[in-house]
Image (tube, rainbow, N blue to C red):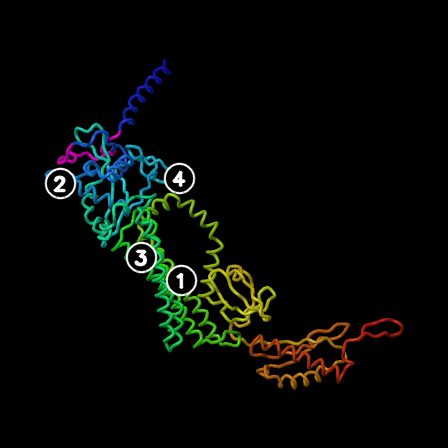
Amino acid sequence: MIHRIRLLLLAVLIGLALPLTAQEPDSQSWYEVDALNAGLDAPPEGLNRASPRASMRAFVELADAGHFAAAQHLLNFNDIPPERQAVQGEIFARQLYQVIDRRVWLDWSGLPARPDALVEDGSSNNPQAGQTRRDLGIKLFQLNGRAYEIRLARYKAPGLDEAVWLFTPQTVEDVPALHDAYGPRAFERHIPDALQREIGALRLWEWIALPLLLGALIALGWTVKSVLDTASGRFSRPFLKTAFERASFPLALFMVALAAQAVLGLAVSFSGPVTAVVQPVLVVIMTSAVGIAILRVIDAVLDRITRRYVSEIDDASGVDKRELYTSIYALRRVIVLLMVGFATIFVLVQLNLFESLGITLLASAGVLTVLLGIAGQAVLGNILASLQIALAKPVRIGDSVLFEGHWAYVESIFYTFMRLRTWDERRIIVPVKYFVSNPFENWSVKDARMMKTVRLRLDHAADAEALRETFETVAKEEEGVIEHDTMCVFVTDHDAHGQEITFYVMTPDPSTGWEVEMRLREKLMAFIREEHPEWWPRERVTGGRHVPDGD
């Protein structure tokens, strides 16, 4: 009995809950209005305005056919007095179509076909998945510091069986400004109707004009570069000449992109597909060209500073010079990072990509973090290690180092790798992170001086004092020997086979020290060979037994 009562109560609760979950407030699905386009005649029979895709398709098809009297019913004129709607409706419809045709590349698959514009993407890609919408942005424009947007919204008025999707009143208000900026130019009024025929995604005259425009822009770029190259040859200062030579190509590229932008903005208004592709490309080209030109000028300045104050970098250069050269490289890396960051932000702002990227990045932040962490770990680690070297300076350009058995000079420090030059002119490329993560000897960390040693294995009969006098005599004759008071000779080891005598001498730098070491060894060996050949290690046989010399 109790079990039946429980089942009955559960059925009652489910029955009460179902109507509540099935109902959806109308205010969440559309905008309620008292009337809709009261100043216009009734819309044509069969005009489909049930979904964003249906409304946009109907508007474009009617406008393509020149039926603007019917296309005006896809716009919401409620902010215009009813007595003026019939007069201005077709004008606004025509102007809006011309803006869309020239500036909007419609993504038909992205326009919802459902009346409620439900977001059907997977929840892992879009945080709005499963939500219904009553308005939808089509295209956002930045014009004279203001934002203008083409937008569709869903409206329900008394007497309508279903809610309909129309261009919003705000879009209608923005149409004149958008048409003045992006509508047909005066040049297009003189184009014959035969050339206005569409072939593929473009009109016939556009297929003709685009190659001609490209040729003219190439000629302009070549002319600008030639003028800049000629002007650079007239500068007497090598710095200005080098700066102009390096910056001539990116500046010519900038002028080409600027001229193309002017043509598209003032003289000719191409179709949406051309504009959607060309406009972002021109923004990227102009930003990149300016950035490259600035970087090349900075490179010329830094090269000038290097040649004037640093000259040739090796272990003979002072610490201050090597630190200055390393700081110059670090400054360039910081400038490059700043320029890349600024250019990226500028392009995103100009192309209005922050809004579209924001939701995508927010939705996929976890996945992107993992992917970037895996793919960019090595690159980011090397960049950070490079900046660490630039700031802490454990090693500087021009320092003499011993790394994994290789004696080399630090020739360059880049973002992700270092280039080491060995004494025999080989180049060793080492990832920066790997270099700083492993021990190395920096022979130039304070100064380039280096104590060199010459070790000789001799017989026990060798006279260390005589060798000391000879060593001091020949060492003082060497130009590469400094601080004569630091020269010394010691017996550093001995065993049954003989003794080891070590000669110490101070040299100004590792490369000079290597040469001094080789010459001193040759002279000491020549002295022993000519004056005391009995000092060479030898073996003796005593009493029929073979014993090492010295026993």
Cα separation, mark 1 vs mark 4, equals 35 Å
Q: Residues within 10 Å of mark 4 (few under 14, many from 20)?
A: few
At 40% from the left edge and 72% from the top edge, which residue is drawn? 242
Marks 3/2: CA distance? 37 Å
Please state which amino acid type lies under the numbered disc 3. Answer: Ala
Tag 3 or tag 4, which sits nearer the N-term? 4
Viewer-nearest residue: 346 or 448: 346
Q: Which residue is mark 1?
A: 336
Marks 1 and 2, how far apart at CA: 57 Å
Residue extending farthest left = 83
Q: Which mark is residue 87?
A: 2
Q: How far apart, in angstroms, are the residues tagged by discs 4 and 2?
A: 48 Å
- Secondary structure beneath disc 4? loop
Q: Residues within 10 Å of mark 3 (few under 14, many from 20)?
A: many
Point out the frontmost of discs 4 and 3. 3
Precedes in sequence: disc 1 or disc 4: 4
Type of amino acid at the residue the image marks with label 4: Ser
The first of marks 3 and 2 along the sequence is: 2
